[in-house]
Image (cartoon, rainbow, N blue to C red):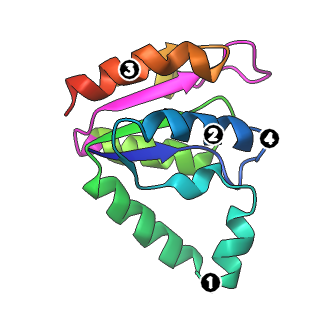
Amino acid sequence: MDIFFSGSIRGGRDDVDLYAELIDLLERHGTVLTEHVGTEDVEEKEAEAGLTDGDIHDQDVAWLRQADGVVAEVTTPSLGVGYEIGRAVAWEKPVLCLYRPDAEHDLSAMVRGNDAVELLEYRRPADVADALEEFLQRHR
């Protein structure tokens, strides 16, 4: 199973360690196409590789199209994550959004109010392991 993991990069990297833990959980069920989201120096690596914003967009859209399912950590607001969720919904990809309700930002109504998106509120990555497995099994 190919899994697209979405999390904030330019919108803020406070959750990078959390993303890495979630990616580790996801890798038990398939190939995470976007494992770079869970690395500390993702932006530096993109710059070193000479990737333009257009290159990044095109690669992410290709991975999104390839994915069997999308898991997005939406606690840190991000335009890119919202864009990816919107594209995934338009392409009728299964989408699971993870949100920590004790965060300083309220979750967008565009995510919470979307019937095409499953939402799971949690506190720690270990809290979502069973739900991730169930989501991914349903959409194999």
Type of amino acid at the residue the image marks with label 1: Ala
Residue at horizontal 48 percent and vertical 55 percent from the top: 34
Alpha-carbon span between mark 1 and mark 4: 24 Å
Label 2 secondary element: helix
Q: Mark 1 against mark 3, which lies toward the viewer?
A: 1
Q: Quadrant of the C terminus?
A: top left
Q: Position of residue 132 (x, y in %)?
A: 41, 23
Type of amino acid at the residue the image marks with label 4: Asp
Label 4 secondary element: loop
Q: Nearer the viewer, residue 35 or 85?
A: 35
Quarter of the view holding residue 73: top right
Q: Mark 2 against mark 3, which lies toward the viewer?
A: 2
Residue 20: assigned label: none
Looking at marks 1 and 4 on the same chain, the residue that comes earlier in the sequence is marked by 4
Q: Which residue is mark 2?
A: 19
Residue 118: assigned label: 3
Q: Which residue is mark 4?
A: 14
Q: Which residue is mark 1?
A: 49
Q: Residues within 10 Å of mark 4 (few under 14, many from 20)?
A: few
Residue at horizontal 58 percent and vertical 58 percent from the top: 36
Looking at marks 3 and 4 on the same chain, the residue that comes earlier in the sequence is marked by 4
**Is the residue 95 above or below the residue 60 in the image?**
above
Q: Position of residue 129 (x, y in %)?
A: 48, 20
Residue 113 visible, this orientation: no
Alpha-carbon span between mark 1 and mark 3: 35 Å
Residue 72 counted in the magenta span: no
Q: Which residues are magenta?
A: 90-108
Quarter of the view holding residue 100: top right
Alpha-carbon span between mark 3 and mark 4: 24 Å
